[in-house]
């Protein structure tokens, strides 16, 4: 039953990523905790990081084939973010599981609110990296990687606007390029947690399978519902906020 729940939970995350292009990984930890039944918050974060990383690289292939990835900018952002991810994940392991869950829940609420806001798609599709852009990408990448590593999330909701701010590229290119960082940050976090034995490899494998299947369905649905993607994003954002509020209340109840 736990294996089935892991596949179903992974498919939910993969479907949401494929459908609206982000935000789904923020649900991975609560799904592992409250649906799959992982009892330890740190193991849930480590397992989530590995699954999100693999699924991000799988989706990256499709964006790369479509020519949406600006590799020089993506590489600089990802490389600098790896350092932040290692530092952030090390700090996350040092904090008590209950406190980490409360902080994670608060970030979940912030993510939901940020998803409701409209993203501008303007930018330079022919942007080329230069020293000025590289410096901005390194600074933003380290900060973003630290937050992603601390909470064990892909961080796409931070990476996309971060890459746009640092390079000036359009939204479509930022979404495609962000997946390289999502996968890299997740892998760095997963390796740090794996070193401490904080990954459930069996559950992670089932979660990854579900994520790949869900991603395929999500991408096909996104094509059919392209005109309604903004509305779908807002609906999903409300779900994310509700999950965050639930985690805060659940943590407060458990503490009492």
Image (cartoon, helix red, strand yellow):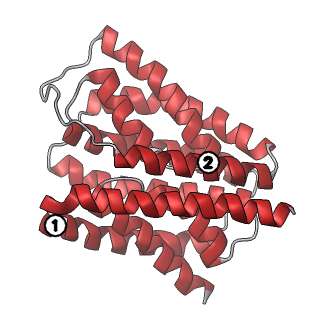
Q: Secondary structure at mark 1?
A: loop
Q: Residue at x 85, y 61 (%)?
A: 255
Residue beneath label 2, please? 106
Picture coordinates of residue 187 (x, y %)? 53, 48
**Which residue extends farthest top?**
131
Q: Which residue sits at x=72%, y=65%?
A: 250
Q: How many marks?
A: 2
What residue did someone put label 1 on?
A: 225
SS at circle 2: helix
* Other residues around mark 1 within 10 Å, as few (<14) / some (14–19) / many (≥20): some
Image position of 235 (left or right of 108): left
Name the side, left or right, on which 102 lies relative to 36.
right
Residue 181 visible in the snapshot: yes
134 up-or-down from 188: above or below: above
Foreground residue among 153 and 196:
153
- Residue 172 rendering spot, x and y as whole percentages: 20, 42
Q: Which residue sits at x=55%, y=51%?
A: 108
């Amino acid at each position: 039953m736990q294996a089935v729940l892991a596949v179903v939970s992974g498919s939910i995350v993969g479907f949401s990523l494929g459908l609206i292009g982000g935000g789904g990984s923020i649900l991975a930890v609560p799904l592992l905790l409250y649906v799959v039944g992982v009892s330890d918050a740190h193991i849930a974060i480590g397992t989530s990081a590995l699954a999100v990383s693999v699924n991000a690289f799988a989706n990256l292939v499709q964006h790369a084939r479509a020519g949406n990835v600006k590799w020089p900018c993506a590489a600089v952002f990802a490389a600098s973010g790896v350092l932040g991810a290692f530092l952030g994940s090390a700090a996350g392991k040092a904090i008590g599981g209950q406190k980490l869950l409360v902080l994670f829940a608060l970030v979940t609420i912030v993510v939901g609110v940020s998803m409701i806001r409209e993203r501008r798609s303007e930018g330079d599709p022919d942007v080329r990296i230069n020293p000025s852009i590289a410096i901005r990408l390194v600074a933003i990448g380290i900060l973003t990687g630290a937050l992603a590593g601390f909470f064990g999330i892909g961080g796409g909701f931070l990476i996309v606007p971060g890459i746009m701010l640092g390079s000036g590229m359009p939204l479509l290119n930022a979404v495609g390029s962000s997946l390289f960082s999502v996968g890299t940050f997740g892998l760095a976090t997963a390796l740090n947690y794996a070193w401490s034995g904080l990954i459930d490899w069996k559950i992670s494998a089932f979660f990854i399978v579900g994520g790949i299947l869900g991603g395929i369905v999500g991408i096909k649905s996104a094509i059919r519902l392209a005109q309604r993607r903004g509305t779908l994003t807002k609906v999903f954002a409300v779900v994310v906020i509700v999950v965050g509020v639930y985690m805060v209340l659940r943590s407060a109840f458990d503490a009492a």
